């Protein structure tokens, strides 16, 4: 009779932590080299060309922290840190003074408004081409808000020395602290030279809280791709430190291991394509201080199931949540006034959504290809429904167009195969090309007798139900 195999003892798995985590526990790099055993090295899963990750046994680190040798080295490091901090503050003050001088000296070139718009559009197209950006849709340069934004950006980057001045300050201590003050000063000068863009300049200003004004050496920072490459090492859960006000363009784009992100209080803007292609991102809490969710900010985050847009946000940018195919729940706050083009296109799991009362425009393709969308409440303040707004919403059954809408765009409800009824008020004076094409189940249009909708229905051989609206 063979002996039964002895079961292995229950030994808990070793927990490894990164070098960044060790430093956060109180070690310096020199203390790591002096006190800790050599780390194991593992290839960085996010950047193959980057140096290998250094991982340490957490239990060993904690044990060494209890030794006298660690305590002595820690006290030395604190003394050195205080001396260095004092030197850093002096350098910060000098850099901020330099930036203030640059702000005073900066000039804004004045050109004819028609040429300005033409050049701004051309510059925007060139920028997107150089970045290989293809969001599968054309930009609507007739959208006044969008056009104003790219015009002001063009002035700032091409008709001032803004970029050159920032480049000259790269790497200097205090550059980030003065960034907000410098950008705001440049925007103020743009508003003086081009008063027609004063409102847009105000929109682009970086918010500086009273707390940060009072604090010494207040940190105003933007998270860039470079910062992410240096500080994010493929963790599933990642916390962004306090002090950042903006997540920059493409900052976390393509971080496929990322499952959840903790954003800091004080953050005001999530930039264009900031989390694009984060295919495993499941959870993110947007702080109340955020006022803008940029173009394509969460595009193709196809593991994201729920999102809450906080009170401070006034606009959901173009394609902000496009192709989030598993997004089921969206809670949009009452502060939102504009849902830009293609904001939720191809959110195929989305079943229902309540659009806030303050929204005035639903951009083109905003809910295009939301195949599971069964119901939607369009608020009274909406005045226009953009082209392709609900194109191919295959499960949508009934729609009530509110009384202030004047135009329903081209292909707005094309291919809504389950749409059975739609109520259109007298305020509508334009139902554009192929608005209800392919609506196989459409039984009737509810409208008032003699209205534009009445005429449209008869011309397109759709049964009419007369109602008081």
Image (spheres, rainbow, N blue to C red):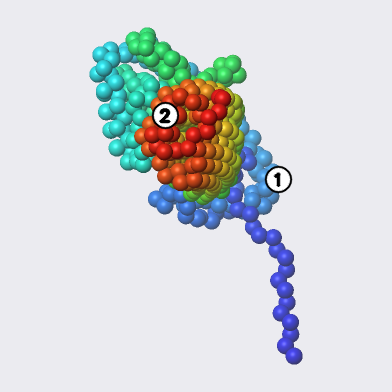
Relative side of 240 to 108, left or right = right
Residue 13 appears anywhere in the view? yes
Numbered tag placed on residue 30 in the rendering:
none
Residue drawn 46% across the image and 49% down it: 46
Quadrant location, the N terminus: bottom right
Foreground residue among 128 and 318: 318
Residue drawn 59% across the image and 16% down it: 210
Quarter where residue 283 is shown: top right
Residue drawn 66% across the image and 60% down it: 13
Tell which tag, 2 or 1, sits nearer the viewer: 2
Relative side of 303 to 126, left or right = right
Q: Which residue is mark 2?
A: 455
Q: Position of residue 319 (x, y in %)?
A: 44, 36
Give the structural element (helix, strand or loop) at label 1. loop
Q: Position of residue 16 (x, y in %)?
A: 60, 53
Q: Position of residue 32 (x, y in %)?
A: 57, 46
Whole-number angstrom distance, CA of label 2 to CA of label 1? 84 Å
Quarter where residue 330 is shown: top right
Foreground residue among 330 and 199: 330
Q: Are marks 2 and 1 in contact (CB under 8 Å)?
A: no
Give the structural element (helix, strand or loop) at label 2. helix
Q: Position of residue 296 (x, y in %)?
A: 44, 37
In the image, farthest residue toward the bottom? 1
Location of residue 89 with respect to 29 vertically, above or below: above
Quadrant location, the C terminus: top right
Q: Which residue is mark 1?
A: 66
Number of numbered labels in the structure image = 2
Crowd band around label 2 with a 10 angstrom C-alpha radius: few (<14), some (14–19), many (20+) = some
Foreground residue among 367 and 2: 367
Residue drawn 29% across the image and 26% down it: 121
Crowd band around label 1 with a 10 angstrom C-alpha radius: few (<14), some (14–19), many (20+) = few
């Amino acid at each position: 009779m063979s002996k039964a195999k002895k079961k292995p003892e229950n030994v808990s798995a070793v927990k490894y932590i990164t070098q960044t985590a060790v430093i956060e526990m109180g070690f310096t790099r020199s203390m790591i080299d002096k006190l800790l055993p050599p780390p194991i090295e593992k290839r960085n899963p996010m950047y193959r060309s980057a140096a290998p990750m250094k991982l340490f046994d957490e239990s060993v680190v904690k044990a060494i922290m209890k030794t006298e040798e660690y305590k002595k080295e820690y006290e030395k490091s604190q003394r050195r840190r205080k001396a260095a901090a004092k030197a850093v503050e002096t350098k910060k003050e000098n850099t901020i003074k330099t930036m203030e001088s640059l702000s005073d000296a900066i000039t804004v070139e004045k050109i004819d408004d028609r040429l300005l718009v033409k050049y701004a559009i051309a510059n925007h197209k060139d920028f997107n081409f150089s970045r290989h950006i293809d969001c599968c849709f054309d930009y609507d340069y007739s959208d006044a808000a969008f056009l104003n934004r790219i015009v002001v950006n063009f002035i700032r980057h091409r008709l001032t020395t803004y970029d050159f001045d920032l480049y000259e300050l790269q790497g200097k201590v205090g550059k980030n602290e003065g960034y907000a003050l410098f950008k705001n000063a440049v925007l103020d000068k743009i508003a003086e030279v081009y008063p027609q863009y004063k409102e847009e300049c105000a929109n682009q200003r970086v918010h500086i809280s009273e707390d940060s004004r009072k604090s010494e050496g207040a940190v105003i920072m933007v998270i860039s791709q470079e910062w992410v490459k240096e500080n994010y090492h493929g963790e599933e859960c990642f916390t962004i430190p306090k002090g950042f006000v903006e997540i920059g363009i493409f900052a976390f784009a393509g971080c496929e291991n990322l499952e959840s992100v903790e954003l800091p209080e004080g953050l005001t803007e999530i930039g264009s394509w900031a989390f694009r292609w984060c295919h495993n991102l499941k959870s993110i809490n947007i702080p109340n201080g955020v006022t803008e969710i940029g173009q394509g900010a969460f595009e193709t985050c196809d593991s994201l199931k729920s999102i809450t847009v906080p009170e401070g946000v006034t606009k959901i940018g173009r394609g902000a949540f496009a192709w989030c195919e598993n997004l089921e729940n969206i809670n949009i706050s009452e502060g939102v006034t504009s849902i830009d083009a293609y904001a939720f296109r191809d959110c195929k799991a989305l079943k229902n959504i309540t659009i806030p009362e303050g929204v005035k425009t639903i951009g083109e393709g905003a809910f295009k290809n939301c195949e599971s969308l069964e119901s939607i409440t369009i608020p009274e303040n909406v005045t226009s429904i953009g082209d392709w707004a609900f194109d191919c919403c295959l499960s949508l059954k009934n729609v009530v167009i509110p009384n202030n809408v004047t135009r329903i765009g081209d292909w707005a409800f094309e291919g809504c195969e389950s749409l059975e009824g739609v109520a259109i008020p007298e305020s509508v004076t334009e139902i554009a090309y192929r608005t209800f094409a392919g609506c196989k189940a459409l039984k009737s249009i509810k409208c008032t007798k003699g209205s534009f909708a009445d005429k449209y229905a008869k011309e397109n051989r759709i049964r009419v139900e007369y109602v008081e609206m």
